[in-house]
Image: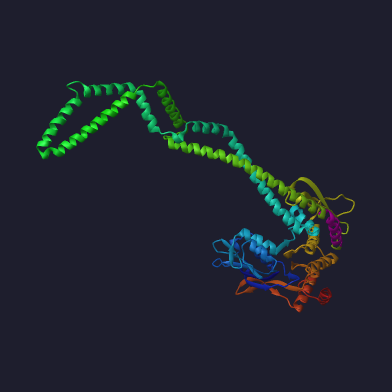
């Protein structure tokens, strides 16, 4: 229930505060008094666009607050949206002089999108020209499902349907990724096989390069070693014989003078090292020979590695290993994708079974409720002066799931007898829309938990008996929800549990709009004025008393 409205520095309103109650709350006031201004301020609470031009004093911010008295069952909704729940919940909207706006729920800042979600649960503003949602399939389903007692099932269905669409999107992405990958997969598998054959983990480039150089220069190496050995082992003038002679003489010198002992030891150590070196050279020379097969294998290895360097635009074996590992990982991902596709298809099938069962239940319940909807709506339309009006509901089955099951809905209407029913958007006139919408709102109020409903001059263009019945219908509706009505009809105003009047007055030379609560006597005078105009007659007062009875 909307329990309090506070507006400050908005258009012609300097400061306004009004407390509202349960039941039928009626607001009246002369044309131009400021009723639309109050309604415009409340639309800010619904998240509509803020206009800096609405600020009365451009040096201060504009504030609109709406306080709601909530039932405990709203607590779950608030927790789901990460909001603090309060029995007395306050929604506030501020427009700053800069043009920026801010929104708050219980003093916690919220996004405009979240504000819209919260406010839509709490308040519904319906103006005389706002009947286009009557033509919307979503709204039409909400009407029929309210009568069908489908609330629990439709919520569960829509939760599963949302999951179903998400799974379908995931499956589509997986298949797309696999399809795109398959175009390159064969080539990448070839590259992976090529890199694997190169045995990169055991390939050492420097070793292979050294072995290749050794094989390519085997004859030169053997020839030079042979010349070395010839120099060392030549008879009488060979290096080894000469060194042996030097060693003998050096030993004799060292035995005669200890000053040469350390030098001799160094010579002897180097002589032994020289003989070892000579032995190893001889050993290498014995095994050294040109091997055409080995040379071919080494050349083939180097050619393959160099080819891979060029193909993959790298300069080292380590980089080739990284390329190989990356391709191998990608191929592994393809296998995972195939598993994801299989798993997701199974999940979709499981959800589809549940959706099929719920869609059938929804359709069955709707079919049962259609005759009830037709009977009650036509009875209300007759009360509101549309005695010949006919209405029907066309439910069409479809193959695929949608947000409401496996059906489409279309309201059909005809105001005059003898003519075929047609889709309501093409069959209804401007004068009929308000009465049809009021009838449907009445049915919804009886069968669904509606938020506070504000009807803005929905009774425009009617009078007499129809106006009286409109008032009766609104009074009946207010037994199921808080109904706030802005009206010019005395017949409606007389039915109010509480009455308010929007007035315009001059304060310090400046025109301002405000709203006041009417006493019983003030209510009588207001109704009489609605009946007779600016000059209230005794007859109007008498008629007003009768209406109030």
**Magenta-drawn stretch, dominant element (helix, strand or loop):** helix
Taking 364 as reference, is 87 left or right?
Answer: left
Query: Is the residue 196 above or below the residue 14 in the image?
Result: above
Pick the quarter of the image with the N terminus: bottom right
Q: Is residue 500 left or right of residue 324?
A: right
Q: Is residue 47 visible?
A: no
Q: Residue at x 18, y 25 (%)?
A: 241
| Quadrant of the image occupied by residue 279 | top left
In the image, residue 492 above or below residue 165: below
- Percent x, y for residue 206? 38, 33
Q: Position of residue 165 (x, y in %)?
A: 68, 48
Q: Which residues are magenta?
A: 366-382
Location of residue 58 by image quarter: bottom right
Residue appearing at x 44%, y 34% in the figure: 202
Q: Which residue is located at x 78 percent, y 71 percent?
A: 493
Q: Residue at x 15, y 30 (%)?
A: 248
Q: Please identify the quadrant where the C terminus is shown.
A: bottom right
Whether residue 368 appears in magenta in the rendering, the answer is: yes
Tell me: 239 left or right of 398.
left
Left or right position of 9 against 313: right
Residue 239 versus residue 519: which sits nearer the camera? 239
Locate residue 237, reporting x and y percent: 17, 22
Q: Nearer the viewer, residue 224 or 349?
A: 224
Residue 336 lies, in percent from the top left, at 60, 42
Residue 418 lies within the magenta run? no
In terms of image quadrants, where is residue 130? bottom right
**Can the viewer see residue 209?**
yes
Tally the marks: 0
- Going by the picture, which residue comes out furthest to the left? 256
Say how the picture is coloured: rainbow
């Amino acid at each position: 229930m909307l329990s309090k409205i506070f507006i400050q520095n908005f258009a012609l309103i300097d400061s306004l505060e009004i407390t509202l109650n349960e039941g039928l709350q009626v607001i009246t006031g002369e044309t131009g008094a400021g009723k639309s201004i109050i309604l415009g301020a409340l639309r800010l609470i619904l998240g509509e666009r803020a206009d800096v031009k609405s600020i009365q004093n451009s040096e201060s911010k504009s504030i609109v607050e709406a306080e709601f008295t909530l039932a405990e069952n709203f607590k779950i909704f608030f927790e789901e949206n990460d909001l603090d729940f309060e029995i007395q919940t306050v929604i506030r909207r501020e427009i700053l002089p800069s043009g920026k706006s801010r929104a708050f729920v219980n003093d916690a800042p919220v996004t405009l999108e979240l504000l819209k979600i919260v406010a839509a649960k709490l308040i519904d503003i319906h103006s005389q020209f706002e009947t286009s949602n009557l033509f919307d399939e979503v709204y039409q389903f909400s009407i029929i499902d309210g009568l069908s007692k489908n609330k629990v099932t439709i919520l569960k269905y829509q939760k599963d349907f949302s999951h179903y669409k998400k799974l379908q999107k995931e499956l589509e992405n997986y298949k797309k990724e696999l399809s795109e990958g398959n175009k390159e997969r064969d080539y990448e598998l070839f590259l992976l096989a090529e890199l694997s054959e190169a045995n990169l983990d055991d390939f050492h480039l420097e070793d292979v390069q050294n072995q290749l150089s050794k094989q390519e220069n085997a004859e030169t190496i053997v020839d030079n070693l042979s010349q070395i050995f010839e120099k060392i082992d030549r008879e009488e003038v060979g290096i080894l014989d000469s060194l042996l002679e030097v060693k003998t003489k050096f030993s004799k010198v060292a035995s005669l003078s200890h000053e040469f002992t350390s030098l001799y030891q160094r010579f002897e150590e180097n002589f032994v090292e020289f003989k070892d070196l000579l032995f190893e050279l001889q050993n290498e020379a014995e095994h050294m020979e040109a091997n055409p097969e080995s040379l071919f294998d080494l050349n083939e290895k180097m050619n393959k590695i160099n080819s891979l360097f060029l193909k993959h635009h790298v300069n080292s074996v380590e980089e080739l290993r990284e390329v190989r590992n990356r391709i191998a990982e990608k191929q592994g991902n393809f296998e995972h994708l195939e598993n994801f596709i299989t798993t997701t298809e199974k999940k979709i099938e499981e959800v589809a079974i549940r959706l099929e069962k719920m869609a059938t239940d929804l359709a069955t319940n709707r079919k049962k409720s259609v005759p009830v909807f037709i009977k009650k709506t036509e009875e209300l339309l007759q009360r509101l002066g549309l005695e010949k009006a006919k209405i029907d509901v066309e439910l069409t089955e479809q193959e695929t799931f949608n947000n409401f099951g496996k059906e489409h809905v279309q309201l059909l209407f005809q105001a005059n007898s003898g003519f075929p029913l047609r889709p309501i958007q093409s069959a209804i006139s401007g004068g009929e829309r308000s009465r049809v919408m009021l009838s449907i709102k009445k049915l919804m109020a009886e069968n669904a938990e509606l938020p506070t409903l504000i009807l803005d001059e929905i009774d425009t263009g009617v009078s007499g008996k129809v106006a009286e019945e409109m008032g009766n219908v609104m009074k009946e509706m207010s037994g199921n929800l808080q109904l706030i009505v802005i009206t010019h009809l005395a017949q409606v105003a007389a039915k109010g549990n509480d009455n308010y009047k929007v007035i315009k007055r001059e304060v310090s030379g400046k025109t301002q709009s405000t709203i006041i609560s009417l006493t019983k006597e003030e209510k009588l005078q207001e109704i009489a004025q609605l009946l007779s105009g600016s000059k209230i007659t005794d007859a109007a007062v008498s008629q007003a008393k009768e209406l109030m009875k």
